[in-house]
Amino acid sequence: LMRIVPFAGVQFLAFDCAKARLAPLLAEPRGALRPFEGAALGAMASGAFAASAATLSTYPLDVLRTRLVGQMSSSVYRSYFSTGETILRVEGPLAFYRGLGPTLLGVLPYGALSFGTFEA
């Protein structure tokens, strides 16, 4: 829940902002694109952007949750705060984004398809 609520908030905010920015760009001269094609393309591009923006902003929370849940026998991490502090001190700030590439590769098509389907 600690990651889902911010993810959804950022995703819908980013989608609305991207859609508003793309609308003038996709408004081609009359007859260039059918209205449905422009709307679908805009929704898909905005959805891909929104999903990636939400992932980038909440990925550190996902790393914290994964580290807490993933520890088997040792109790290195006791809470979200101590987990974040230990990761920052021992591994540095980039450790919060380790593994982001494959996650973004999965999220981009998800955002494009889900928003493209619902909005168009």
Image (tube, grey):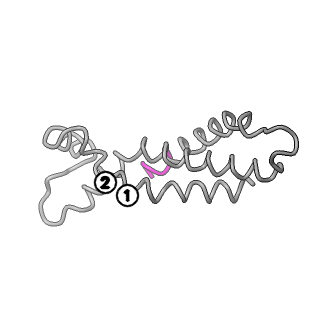
- The location of residue 103, given as percent across then percent down, is 40, 56
Mark number, residue 114 = none
In reply to whether residue 114 is colored magenta, the answer given is: no
Classify residue 17 by image quadrant: top right
- The location of residue 110, given as percent across then percent down, is 55, 59
Q: In this view, does 110 lie to the left or right of 25?
A: left
Viewer-proximal residue among 74 and 38: 38
Q: For the residue marked with disc 2, what is the amino acid?
A: Gly
Q: Vertical placement of 27 versus 48: above or below?
A: above
Residue designated by label 2: 99
Viewer-proximal residue among 120 and 1: 120
- The residue positioned 56% from the left and 50% from the top of the image is 48
Q: Vertical placement of 30 versus 100: above or below?
A: above
Badge 2 marks a residue whose secondary structure is: loop
Mark number, residue 102 = 1
Mark 1 Cα shell of 10 Å, populated few (<14), some (14-19), many (≥20): few
- The residue positioned 49% from the left and 42% from the top of the image is 53
- The residue positioned 29% from the left and 50% from the top of the image is 64
- The location of residue 27, given as percent across then percent down, is 78, 38
Q: Vertical placement of 101 versus 10: above or below?
A: below
- The residue positioned 69% from the left and 35% from the top of the image is 20
Q: For the residue marked with disc 1, what is the amino acid?
A: Pro
In reply to whether residue 4 is colored magenta, the answer given is: yes
Q: Is residue 2 left or right of residue 72?
A: right
Q: Give the range drawn in magenta.
A: 1-6
Badge 1 marks a residue whose secondary structure is: helix
- The location of residue 115, given as percent across then percent down, is 65, 54
- Which residue extends farthest right? 30
Q: Is residue 24 left or right of residue 86?
A: right
Mark 2 Cα shell of 10 Å, populated few (<14), some (14-19), many (≥20): few
State if disc 2 and disc 1 touch (CB < 8 Å): yes
